[in-house]
Amino acid sequence: MPILLLLLVLLSCSTARADELSTPTTAAAATHTELGKSFFAQGRYDLARLEFEGAYALSKEVDLLYNLALCWEREGRPREAAEAYERYLREKPDDRETAQKLARLKEQVQPVPHERLRPRQKLGVALLVLGGATLVSALALGLVTDRDRQQLVSGNLTYREAQALADRATTERSATIALGVIGGALAVGGLVPTVW
């Protein structure tokens, strides 16, 4: 019996000795954790997060991932919080409450779908585009008409060439005015259904 007692004492000493070897790392992790809790209580979530990250790096304690997620969440950063909760849940998949919290966070992180254009708005956009293209055509035709007018003024044309150029310029000017009016009307007509 005394030998058995002696073996138990020796065994407990060797276990205590192994614990003493890991004490500096454990103590450092505990210090980071306590500092993190203190900063968290003060509302200094960024500093708390840094301390919890340091503690996790030393101890790999899973609950510290939950603390990190809380810090990210309190900082208003749902994407990072969701990532931390996912890491936590990989280690503790049975935590249903955290899984539900993660699902709610993921809904916040999802991009907001763009509203589709209503048919009336589609018509307005089409009219705006068509009106814009018509106005650009009117501008291009106006530039050609101006070039023809400059040739007429230069005086380097025969009577027959000048007459043909003047007739063409008159037609171009009429077409320019018509395209400008039509393009403007289409653009204004497109604004109404697009905006309202």
Image (spheres, rainbow, N blue to C red):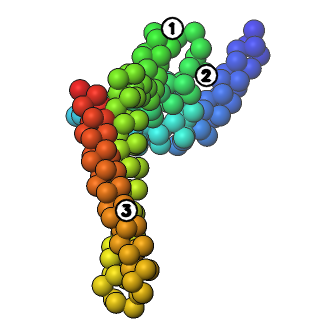
Amino acid type at circle 1 is Arg
Residue 87 can be seen in this image: yes
Amino acid type at circle 3 is Glu
Q: Earlier in the sequence, mark 1 or mark 3?
A: 1
Amino acid type at circle 2 is Arg
Q: CA distance from mark 1 to mark 2?
A: 12 Å
**Does residue 57 appear to the left or right of 17 in the view shown?**
left
> Where's the N terminus, which quadrant?
top right
Q: Which residue is mark 1?
A: 96
Q: Secondary structure at mark 3?
A: helix
| Mark 1 surroundings: few (<14), some (14-19) or many (≥20) residues within 10 A | few
Q: Which residue is mark 2?
A: 90
Mark 3 or 2: the one toward you? 3
**Does residue 4 appear to the left or right of 150 in the view shown?**
right
- Taking the spot 23% from the left edge, 26% from the top edge, the residue there is 196
Q: Which residue is mark 3?
A: 172
